[in-house]
Amino acid sequence: MRPVRPEPPVLLSVARNWQGTEVSCSSATTTALSGPQSWRLPQLDALGADADVVSVTIGGNALGFSSNLATCVGLAVKDPTGNPCQTFLTSDGTDRLAQRVDDIVPTIADAPDALRQRTPYAEILVAGRLSRPVPGRRGRLHQLRRTARRR
């Protein structure tokens, strides 16, 4: 496995002229790898031993990235120089984002083995998402990133 730049897998496949099957789905969480999501089959079921390349982006939805980002942006508008995101995420004395990271780490850690079992000869690319959601880090929006990096 090797990380790639934060390009969505579809763009990566077009740029490299790869042919394949797109099985990612919006709002999928880490459980969608091995279990169904709504009406969709588990994503691992789409993989075969003949795959050459598999790209995976995992963890953001299970972490609540989008909702945390929206909340933190909203809070930062009201308090652009403080740390409202950090205050919100730790308001009960527990770092809730760090706890979510701890909760999903086992599933993410198991993903490479699950992919390798299905695709023994494929190159597995771990694709990222946004590394800095909002320029300037106003309102300490980087709390999301820093907390995830601690793990």
Image: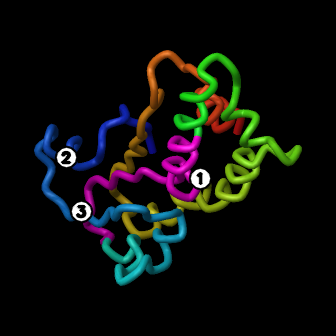
Residue 28 location in percent, x, y? 44, 64
Residue 128 location in percent, x, y? 42, 40
Q: Residue at x 53, y 63 (%)?
A: 30
Q: Residue at x 69, y 31 (%)?
A: 84
Between 21 and 6, which is closer to the camera in this rendering? 6
Between 114 and 62, which is closer to the camera in this rendering? 62
Q: Which residues are magenta?
A: 47-71
Label 3, on which residue? 22
Element carrying mark 1: helix
The answer for how far apart the CA atoms under marks 1 and 3 are is 23 Å
Q: Residue at x 41, y 40 (%)?
A: 129
Q: Which mark is residue 13?
A: 2
Circle 2: is it few (<14), some (14-19), or many (20+) Cα within 10 Å?
some
What amino acid does circle 3 point to?
Answer: Glu
What amino acid does circle 2 point to?
Answer: Ser
Residue 20 location in percent, x, y? 18, 60
Quarter of image, res 31: bottom right
The answer for how far apart the CA atoms under marks 3 and 2 are is 10 Å
Quarter of image, res 54: bottom left
Element carrying mark 3: loop
